[in-house]
Amino acid sequence: MKNYFEFEKLGTSYRQEFIGGLTTFLAMAYILVVNPLTLSLASIKDFPDVLRMDHGAVFVATAIASAIGSIVMGLLGKYPLALAPGMGLNAFFAYTVVLGSHIPWQHALGAVLISGVFFFLLTLTGLREKIINAIPVDLKHAVGAGIGLFITFIGFQQSGIIVKNDATLVGLGNLSNGTTLLTIFGIVITVIMMTRGIKAAVFYGMIVTAIVGMIFHLTPVPHQLIGSVPSIKPTFGAVFSAFGDHSFWSTSMIGIILTFLFVDFFDNAGTLVAVANQAGLMKDNKLPNAGRALLSDSIATMVGAVLGTSTTTSYIESTAGVASGAKTGFASLVTAGLFILSIFFYPLLSVITTPVTAPALIIVGVLMVSSLGNINWKQFEIAVPAFLTMIAMPLSYSIATGIAIGFIFYPITMIVKGRIKEINPIMYVFFVIFLVYFILK
């Protein structure tokens, strides 16, 4: 094992990798709570139960998909990067596809699976790696920041801090509401711990917030810590039922699939690049051994869709593990093992509600938006597409829309500035694709 992961060459040890893997798990363990709540649309009232995913099944699918994805990344990619259902993509799945379009979640899983297969083939041919490397580094950072803003907006919305306003579209909610106050407390306590440099502050913040919520009767009290594993039957293999439904292959569903392809590709790429940047793995705007890392993402996405969860991708919280000493894929194996163990703690995790998880969404958004500092804002031709990419995501409630707008403006501003030679030919292809995307939308 030491030789396979080159411990001696990289100057690491089992203890160092274990601590790194544990830190990564604690930093991203919130997904075990947030993902089931998101995909089951727990915060949405008066919504048909038939369109909701089973909370317990999604919990198990999230844990297993995260474990498998991290194992594949550790063994194949050899990077200290853990995988789990992506924040942003799960929101797109739940709020745009299922809630917004009233598309059955089985069909949405079908779109995820197809996108995974498509990207798997793209990765095998090496085309996906070339496409990622063709995207300007400034736009890569803008995509990561935009996803962060989108996630933060969802956190504010779910907590009631930001609500619908007929006059101004959005406005400040009732801050005297008990659950809203609990979320605000969670934000404050998490920010304090993050500022103090406490590892896994997001996870600890959720624990403290949940305890305070139980004290003031704002969240339920768990009756047991360890219990039986929820059945994954409601979601396992449900994706295949969509393929036998003729409505899945309708024109409108094709549009959903294409959108998932765009979001899946750029969300995966943006998150992977963001993690690699913070971990110091990027070299000359390129990710070494990117093919295997991207292959891991593709495999995890396909497995996750079959299990019953949205797209599985690399997590920016992996940088917490890297900061703790993780340097190899062995740390990812440790994280995977902890995800498997967490399945038995469902009774404890299932009582953590939206007001408890909202602070996590907001803080994760802060971490992702930090990539803004890497964008060259002094060059207007770069600033415009980067800004539009970032700001359009939360305002349009769509990651794909933000990406499309930014990628359309980039060739325009660069050509006008006289920097046509710096534009990769692939960016022209994106320009045409996204232009057609808006015309047909």
Image: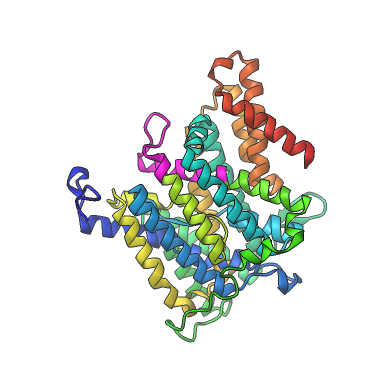
- Give the residue drawn at x 63%, y 17%: 415
Q: Is residue 276 magenta?
A: yes
Residue 107: where, in percent of width, then height? 68, 61
- Assign the N terminus to one quadrant of the image: bottom left
Q: Is residue 353 left or right of residue 283?
A: right
In this orientation, which residue lies closer to the viewer: 62 or 303? 303
* Rendering quarter of residue 181: bottom right
Q: Position of residue 301 (x, y in %)?
A: 52, 55
Residue 201, visible in the rendered structure: no
Q: Position of residue 241 (x, y in %)?
A: 66, 66
Res 219 → quadrant:
bottom right
Q: Nearer the viewer, residue 278 or 56?
A: 56
The residue under the point 49% across, 74% down is 349
| Spot occupied by residue 424 in the image (x, y as percentages of width and height) | 55, 24
Q: Is residue 403 visible?
A: yes
Q: Which residues are magenta?
A: 265-292
User: Which picture quadrant has residue 423?
Assistant: top right
